Image (spheres, grey):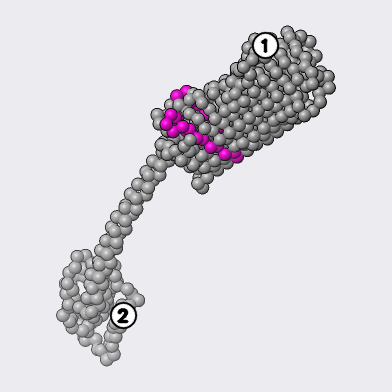
Amino acid sequence: MIGSIALVSALLAAAPADRPRAIPPRVAEPDLHLDPKVLEVPDLDLDLHGFEMPDLHFDVRGFEMPDLDLSDLRHELGKLRSLARLRDLDLTGPGLLALRDEDEDSEDPDDEASDAGTSDRARQERDRAARDRDRAARDRDRETRDRDRETRDRDREMRDRDRETRDRDRWDQGRWDRSRWGSRSDDEDASGEQPSSRAAGKNGAATLAVKGPVTFRLRVQSGEVEVVPSDKPQIALSVDGVPVAGGVQLLQFGDRVEAEFSGRRQLRRGRLRVELPKGSNVDFDSTSGDVSVQEVGGDVRVRTMSGDVKVKGARNADVQSVSGDVSLNVTGPRLRLHLVSGTALVTTADPAVQLAFQSASGNLEWSGVCAKGCHLSTETVSGEIKLQPDASKSSFQLSYASHSGDLRDELKLEVKRAPRRKHGMGGWVEAVYGKGEGVIECDAFSGDVIVRKK
């Protein structure tokens, strides 16, 4: 034990003198990291060669050996070695200054990163606000489109209800017409109905006296028919261009009169001229025969496959044709046209006219007055509709719907709404002329509508 103490004393005595230590400047709690890979520990070379241990004489009489606890001696020696290493470190050198510079410089990137982060957050906030504004604008546009769609749906429902109402009116009108015109079955000749009067003629001509206007029914397979008014209370009929074997007869059934040719109530071919009292009605059926009714003044009903129809001065008219052309001039309020192809030229005089036109590829050219109580309805697939209202007397609302057709306005209508479908094809238009008292409805798949002055 005593030898160990002597050895420690010798080591302390042989250690080099203490050098003045540089006191490093205090910084606010620097985070000093010493990398053992970089730090070089000096080698302590203690040459004890030639060292003679002095003779030590200790008088230990009466000396009591204290209890020594040397358990921490190794720990203390480690502290001494560490102090010896630190004594040789130059803490005032450029290393610590560089470390301080690095610490100071390291603060700048943090500040710059903080400033950059603040700028990024501000830009993100601006972008988020812009996206919110765009989203709000899209929501408003979507709401507007939804409202427009709801409005169109309501308008479509109203048009459908109006169409259903018109169809019911047409059906009721058709029932009234059938009751008025009577049935037209092929078995009429054998129905057993007896005429109230008859008139037989010679050489293809016959005359029947009547008390006033009547309903004249005529059926023709092929030929030409001309009906004109007469001031006399009689019906005069003549056939030209073909001999009629068996003669011609006129048969009266109440207020209805029919013609019979060689025992059949149908003219096969030839030219026929009929004179009727003014105000009489005409009911005409044909396969390919043409008919012309001039200034008779009553109602006209025509059913034909390919014949041309010319009516002038009639009160009301109901015409159906497959491929023939139609020319109508009526004075009354009711007019109905149904064409597959061909062109219909229509002139009306009543300002409250009720015109219903339907066609596949047929065209309509109408001129007249449309004011209070007027209702023009046109439906076509590919036909063209030309409307020429009297600009000085007309007042109406116009609606036009089409898949690929166009509206050409030469009357300077006041357009209320005109949305179009996608890709610029078709759409629908609502416009007003004058006070908007009448109604004009035009529906077409690919047909155009042209509005011009009369």
Counting residues from the start of the chain, the first of labels 1 and 2 encountered is: 2
Position of 72 with respect to 182 (left or right) is left
Instruction: Please tell me whether residue 454 belongs to the stretch shown in magenta.
Output: no
Q: Please report the bounds of the magenta region as a residue range.
A: 372-398
- Residue at 77% of width from left, 14% of height from top? 200
Q: CA distance from mark 1 to mark 2?
A: 145 Å
Comparing labels 1 and 2, the label whose residue is closer to the camera: 1
Q: Is residue 77 above or below residue 151?
A: below
Between 168 and 203, the one nearer to me in the picture: 203
- Residue at 26% of width from left, 80% of height from top? 7
- Residue at 32% of width from left, 73% of height from top? 35
Instruction: Please tell me whether residue 388 belongs to the stretch shown in magenta.
Output: yes
Q: Is residue 65 above or below residue 438?
A: below
Q: For mark 1, does the 10 Å Cα neighbourhood hold few (<14), some (14 to 19), or many (20 or more) residues? A: some
Position of 49 with respect to 144 (left or right) is left
User: Based on the displayed image, in which of its 4 quarters is residue 66 positioned?
Assistant: bottom left
Question: Which residue position holds label 1?
Answer: 210
Q: Amino acid at mark 1?
A: Val
Q: Which mark is residue 40?
A: 2
Residue farthest toward the right in the current orientation of the protein: 245
> Residue 189: image x %, image y %?
79, 15
User: Based on the displayed image, in which of its 4 quarters is residue 342 positioned?
Assistant: top right
> Residue 82: image x %, image y %?
26, 74
Q: Amino acid at mark 2?
A: Glu
Image quarter hosting the N terminus: bottom left
Q: Which mark is residue 50?
A: none
Position of 35 with respect to 209 (left or right) is left
| Secondary structure of the residue carrying numbered label 1 | loop
| Secondary structure of the residue carrying numbered label 2 | loop
